[in-house]
Image (tube, rainbow, N blue to C red):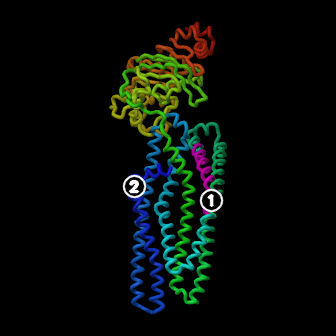
Amino acid sequence: MIKQLAGCVRQYKKYALLSPFFVTLEVVMEVIIPFLMATLIDKGINEGNMNAILNIGGLLVLFAVLSLTFGALAGRYAAKASAGYARNLRHDMYHNVQEFSFSNIDKFQTSSIITRLTTDVTNVQNAFQMIIRVAVRSPIMMIFSLVMAFSVNHKISLIFLASIPFIGIGLYLIIKNAHPVFERVFRTYDVLNRIVQENLRGIRVVKSYVREEYEKSKFEKVSTQIYRDFSTAERIVALSMPLMQFGSYISILFISWIGARLIVSSEMTTGQLMSIITYASQILMSLMMLSMIFVMITISRASAERISELLEEKSNLKNGENPIYEVKNGDISFKNVSFGYTSNKICLSNINIDIKSGETVGIIGGTGSSKTTLVQLIPRLYDATEGEGFVGGENVRDYDIHTLRNEVSMVLQKNVLFSGTIKENLRWGCEDASDEELVRVCKLAQAHEFIMSFPKQYDTYIEQEGTNVSGGQKQRLCIARAILKKPKILILDDSTSAVDTRTDSLIRKAFREEIPDTTKIIIAQRISSVEDADKIIIMDNGSVNDVGTHEQLLERNPIYQEIYYSQMKGGDKSAAVISK
């Protein structure tokens, strides 16, 4: 994990190395200053030597200025390195997510990915900055100060060695108990983000059902849990400061008591005692800073593990050794295909289908019959668990994934429009499309008329998730976007459910006349949406129940008959036959 996260430093490595370099120089200056102060007192003030005072005083000013300069440079480079490191982490995580297959995305909740990209990255960024600056400064300061203290008086300096194990054991126990709590906190953050996300997306439903109080209580419950966990963790972590202060004050008391006795016995000068006390403060301050670093690392360790988990996740859909970069036509074939999202839950079983290029195929069936799952195997959003799928006469696994998906347009059940103008949304299908092409596909999708009714027409701004257009308008815009892609296969997954039957009929008529060579697969709940298809596939419980034309299925298939008659005259079979 450390090796993987360290690899994200990349172009900011120079700054990450310059920061500890200048920190080291800053520490050297700070360690020399107490020694000069002791010399100033013993050789200058006590002896009344004005030349010594001026000379040593001048050196003190110089070393203080150098220390300030090196510290400022270290801080600047540390800020650049940590900000750049966080940028690379977000870049690598986001780009990796873009490569995920649907099964990879299913593994992580959206709210969890957002938390990892924001809160977790911030925690790791703060820890990284402390590591390249404070974590370098503290141990170097402690070592150099110990060396200088021993050079002044080795007997009195033994006090430091006695206090360090005591403080170290205390810090270890604090970290050991705090880390599991922080891990639990960040998992709860995922839940909190999910609740907020669901509430904001479904705010209209919340208000229409007057469920504001329920949503508030749900939020408060999770928020309170985070408060309690954080309070517990902070209480444990807060013990580090009293521990450090106790060790510091005890050490200084012993140094002062022993040092006073040594001065009386003329074994130590006043300046030496002063420098020892200063070194004691530097050593103990370094230990206190180390405790802060350990706390930050404890907090960020859970975040680092979560980031690493997302970075390590790799798509289970990959190109073969010699991928095919051309899809010849829209032929589709499934041979003994079975599929399950998990090994113990099979959604599709022994599917055998042949669809010729340019055909219009309807897919109909009850809720949960795996209609959507079936069509998702065509552009290889998932891989079949068993059997083989073919497009254009080639196994879908043999294609370059991007090439295959560029030739398959899908309008999903959950239509998605992005923030931006209508033109910008349509050009997801073809970013170089002219305005004339946009108008053409919108006319095919029966969207042109309502677009022209907007004040800004095709420059109308679409709010996030298309909240300022109706469900039917959103569906027609998504269909237009899919047609603009000029695919060899067009899949409409219940994508006309929000439009009236007349508009639905006009869209299908435009498909027949304008894109006859494109294979069209229409998943629908309404018989009227598929009755004029070249063939209709009946799905039942993850299997193909029957395949035929409208007339054939109406004559022989009980499932199709039940759906048909339930939609005609309220289910009156005789009335439906008469009306026919």
Q: Is residue 188 magenta?
A: yes
Residue 223 in percent (x, y) is at 63, 50
Residue 13 in percent (x, y) is at 40, 56
To which quarter of the image does residue 29 belong? bottom left
Residue 529 shows in this picture: no
Q: Is residue 104 magenta?
A: no
Q: Which residues are magenta?
A: 170-194
* Mark 2 element type: helix
The residue nearer to you, when weighing 218 against 510, is: 218
Q: Which residue is mark 2?
A: 12
> Which residue occupies 45% across, 38% down?
99
Residue 366 in percent (x, y) is at 59, 21
To which quarter of the image does residue 418 belong? top left
Instruction: Using the image, determine if residue 394 lies above or below residue 19.
Output: above
Instruction: Using the image, determine if residue 266 lies above or below residue 184.
Output: below
Under mark 2, the amino acid is Tyr
Under mark 1, the amino acid is Glu
The residue nearer to you, when weighing 479 against 341, is: 341
The mark lying in front, picked from 2 and 1, is 2
> Which residue occupies 39% across, 25% down?
487
Magenta region, mostly helix, strand or loop?
helix
In-image side of 105 versus 219 (left or right)? left
To which quarter of the image does residue 405 belong? top left
Q: Which residue is mark 1?
A: 234
The residue nearer to you, when weighing 256 against 559, is: 256
Instruction: Using the image, determine if residue 113 lies above or below residue 414.
Output: below
Instruction: Using the image, determine if residue 14 lies above or below residue 352.
Output: below
Q: Which mark is residue 367?
A: none
Nearest to N terminus: mark 2 or mark 1: 2
| Residue that lies at the very extreme toward the front in this rendered image | 155
